[in-house]
Image: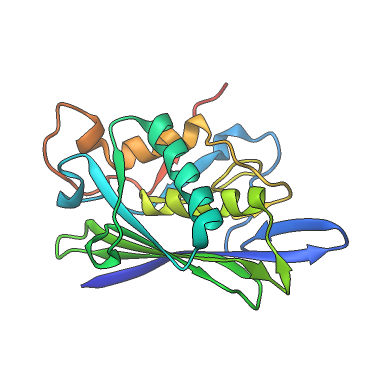
Amino acid sequence: MRLFVISTASIILLLTALLIFDSNLAFAKKGDSSKKKIELCCAWGDSLDDGILTFSINDGGSDLAKIVKLAINDWEKALGGIEFKYVKDGSDADVEIDFKKGKGKKVGKTVTFFDHLGFINQVDISISKKSYGYTLDKRTLEHVAKHEIGHALGLGHATFKGTLMSPNVDEIITKISACELESVKYANNWKFDEKVNSPHPLDKDDFKCKKK
C-alpha cells in the first residue's frame, strides 16, 4: 500500500498576527487570474462507490470534535453528492482524524493512502491544538480542519492567496470557494458525473479557476 503526505500546514506567531503558511509553493502574482489554479492530488476509488465517506475523531474532546464535524458538514452541504458518516471505530473509517497537543509550528497534516490502482482508499489527518504554546482559537481550527479535509477529498494546494487551500495565507479563511468545490468535483468526477460509473485516473494535475 502506497502512502503520500499531501500537506503539512504550519503556524507562526508574528507580533499579534496569526499566520498559517507552507513554504513549498510560491504565491501567484496579484491580479494574474491565469495562474489561479488548485493542484489535484488524486481521486477516491471504490470506497466512494456508495457516495459515503466514513470518518472518526480521536482525542478531540467534545469541543474540538464539534468544530471538525461542522467543518465536514460545510463541505458536505456545499458539494452535494457525497455524504460523510461518523463512526466511532477509527479502524473502520475512510478518514481518521486525530488531535495532537502540538509543540512546534505544524498544525495540520494529511497522509493519503492508495490502493493498488492508485486511488485513495484511506486518509489520516492530524490537527494540533497548540502551536508555540498558544492554544488555537475556534476559527483557526476551523480553517485548519477545512483545509485538511480539502486534501482528504483529493486537492493539493492553491496557487493564489485568499482561499482556503492556499499554503500561505495572511488571514483566517473558513469559506469554501467555488473553485475548491469544482476542483473536488473534477478530481472525483466519476462520482459527480452520472455518465461515469467507475473510478479513473486524473488526466491533469491542476484545476484552473473560472474567471469572475
Q: State the residue lying farthest toward the right.
A: 15
Which residue is at the front of the view, 180 or 94? 94
- In this picture, residue 45 sits left or right of residue 36: left
Tell me what residue is drawn at x 36 percent, y 50 percent.
Answer: 154
Q: Is residue 77 visible?
A: yes
In the rendered image, residue 142, in percent from the top left (x then y), is placed at 58, 49
Identify the residue at horizontal 29%, vertical 55% (top origin). 87
Q: Position of residue 59 (x, y in %)?
A: 46, 68
Horizontal side of residue 147 vs 187, given as left or right? right
Q: How many marks?
A: 0
Indicate left or right for 132 with 36 as reference: right
Q: Looking at the image, which residue is at 57% across and 21% down?
A: 212
Determine whether 155 is above or below 95 in the image: above
Q: Residue at x 65, y 47 (%)?
A: 139
Instruction: Single out the residue that lies furthest toward the left.
Output: 197
Is the image coloured rainbow, by chain, by secondary structure, or in one colour? Answer: rainbow
Is residue 27 among what the camera can see?
no
Identify whether 45 is placed above or below 13.
above
Q: Residue furthest bottom?
A: 103
Splitting the image into 4 quarters, where does residue 115 fall?
bottom left
In percent of width and height, residue 57 lies at 40, 60
Toward which corner of the image does residue 3 lie, by quadrant?
bottom left
Extreme-front residue of the structure: 62
Question: Residue 62 at what x, y percent from top left?
Answer: 51, 56
90 left or right, relative to 5: left
Is residue 96 positioned above or below 86 on the image? below
- Please name whichever residue, 33 or 49, is drawn nearer the observer in this view of the structure: 49
